[in-house]
Amino acid sequence: MSDTRPLCLSGKGVTKVFGFGEKKTVAVDHVDFEFHEGELISIVGESGSGKTTISKMLLGLTSVTDGTIYFQGKPLDIRTQKKKKEYWKDIQAIFQDPFSSYNVFHKIDQVLLDCINMRGGKKLSMDKKIEMMTEACSFVNLKYAELTNKYPFELSGGQMQRLMIARIFLLKPKILLADEPTSMIDACSRATILDMLMNLRNEIGMTIIFITHDIGLAYYISDSVYIMEHGKFVESGTADEVILNSKAPYTKRLISDVPKIYEEWDLNTVTFSTES
Amino acid sequence: MKNTLRQVFHSPKFVAGFIIFVAVLMTLFIYPLFNPGNPLQMLALNSFSKPGTYVSVYDSIDTDSIVMKLPGAAEKRLEDKLSMDDRLAMKEWLVTAGVPEGDIDTTDTTNLLKIWKEKYDPSIKPAGMTIAKRNYYKRLTIDLDKALNSNEVTIATPNAETGALEEAKKINDTDYVNTKDVTNAITLPLGTDNFGRDVLKELVSAARTSIMIGFIAGIIATLIGLSTGLLAGYVGGMVDELILFITNLFTVIPGFIILILISYGIGQENRGATTVAITIGLTSWTWTTRSVRSQVISLRNRDHVNLSKLSGHSLPRIILSDILPYIASYVVMALILQISTAILAEAQLSMLGLGPKTTEVPTLGLMMNWAMVYSAHTHGYWWAYFPVLLIIALVSFSLNLMNTGLDQVFNPTLRD
């Protein structure tokens, strides 16, 4: 890759092993990657290929068994709670299942206030905080007045995921890790949410690491694509390189599983792959 | 929260258990208001007096009496005088005197007396009968005559100077007094125990102490179990290994044995109710730890916990606000079960004589222990142990019912 933008996240031989002895499972197997600032990277792979594990490692939610992750060129050091807290100001996430992403005992205000507090807005006046929350909500087409004093489970899945984006809007991180943010949402809301994510990216200029199993979606939105199979990156490069000129057989299979991604969809001719 | 409460109070099992428990608790707190006094005061010098109302014989002499002629009063009196042993002895004599055995019915008092009057002759000396036995028959006949003739009884008091008896009052067989008019009377609904204490009063006090022991022990056990379980489950790693090691140690050695050893080690003199409660609490936390730990492990990788971490919340805050509320219902259930187990554990310990000091407070277990030591069960003094058993059963039944009800509310797969 010949990207001149500075590196924001990169990894050398990053490995994650669960268990030991006979029950040993290698979830992520010596992967190398280079994510540049402002880029939109997609990590594509099927269920169980290690996508979520690598996202957890990047977020610092699980330890790395072997290898090093570099953040802005320096090895990532998140051994203390304080350093973790600093790191999490720069990297944030949107999770797959909006229904389980919220603490059901906390009100929506609490979720948004936490973000303001994290950005150092603890001492702001309540009016100012409400103004910020209203702005964030309107960015994702939600009305703060309707949400205040409500619990997250009173919203629909799409609204919850939009609230997640509002959270990111308030936090303004350098990197956003979106772990299949649209897979639990119906098709109509999906487009809206992707649209909002792209708007947000333009607004803050952040790097987005988009994790998905939908190679079609990945092609539409990303600058570069990493294809993951059994814990390894089998192919990587710009979206055009990988999708239009794929070399790995796994990539070809993924593409054939999602037919006609670069032409108009004709549902009558959809063929399903018979290989397993 | 409001919804959950409403749901809980719509579960018939929980409501039934709750009502029983509250009713027992109310009784325990209201009864002493009407019947104050030291529950350990020894009222009677005899042990195991039957349940009933006791009136002072002394005071009843001075009480104004009325004359009543109740039908069959004399027969009743006579019947009460003649014990089954006397009847059988009478039959024995009559048979040796030549009355056919078939004619004598020991349960028919009137007929028996009729035959006795006709046939009995103190001068006859049946073969092989001792003098003592013959004297017994003479005494029996005199007693029967007295009962039948219903003579007045004279109450006499000795003159202070001369020492001669002076008639104070004559009592007829038709004189009756109202028990309410007798100055000194006491109703013992459950009689007295081996020490002559009022069993009901003692039971109320004992049940209060036992429930208190249950609560203290249950809360201690739940607090220890909860904090170790949360720590082991959430922090994991070395902390988890260490806590699990200690928990396993306590699990493989039967808790009750440890409890007995600790209780024995503390010594009789130092064992108050609170000490016993703390001892029980300190030995019964293990399964709370294990189950809380497994619940927390399943929770700690949920997205809402990850989100909380990403929001920069500290470890105590995550445990308190993201983990604890999710297992709160479970912890309440564990607490209820721990209370019930602790009440039973106290009863078991005290039965073995390792309960609280006997001179300070009664507990349900101690009452059982006393009843057992003084062989109440072999003599049929049911009032000394059966009400205690009933209270223990009622309290633990109601607590378990509440627990099952809660379980059904919080675990939809168990709903029927």
Image (cartoon, coloured by chain):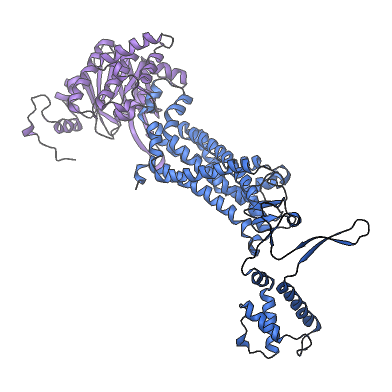
Q: Residue furthest right?
A: B162
Q: Is the residue B105 above or below the residue A17 in the image?
A: below
Please state, as top left, top right, bottom left or bottom right, where the N terminus of chain B lies in the image. Answer: top left
Please give left or right for residue A114 compared with residue B355 in the image. left
Colour chosen for chain A: purple
Quarter of image, res A213: top left
Q: Is the residue B174 above or below the residue B143 in the image?
A: above
Task: Tell me if I can see residue A156 in this picture.
Answer: yes
Decide which of B333, B266 is in the foreground and name it.
Answer: B333
Please give left or right for residue B362 compared with residue B20 in the image. right
Please give left or right for residue A115 compared with residue A276 in the image. right
Task: Tell me if I can see residue B242 in this picture.
Answer: no
Colour chosen for chain B: blue
Q: Is the residue B210 above or below the residue A270 in the image?
A: below
Q: Residue at left 75%, top 70%?
A: B151
Residue B268, x across and y down, in percent: 72, 46
Q: Residue at left 33%, top 27%?
A: A101
Quarter of image, res A46: top left
Decide which of B191, B63 is in the foreground and name it.
Answer: B63
Please give left or right for residue A274 compared with residue A164 in the image. left
Q: How many marks?
A: 0
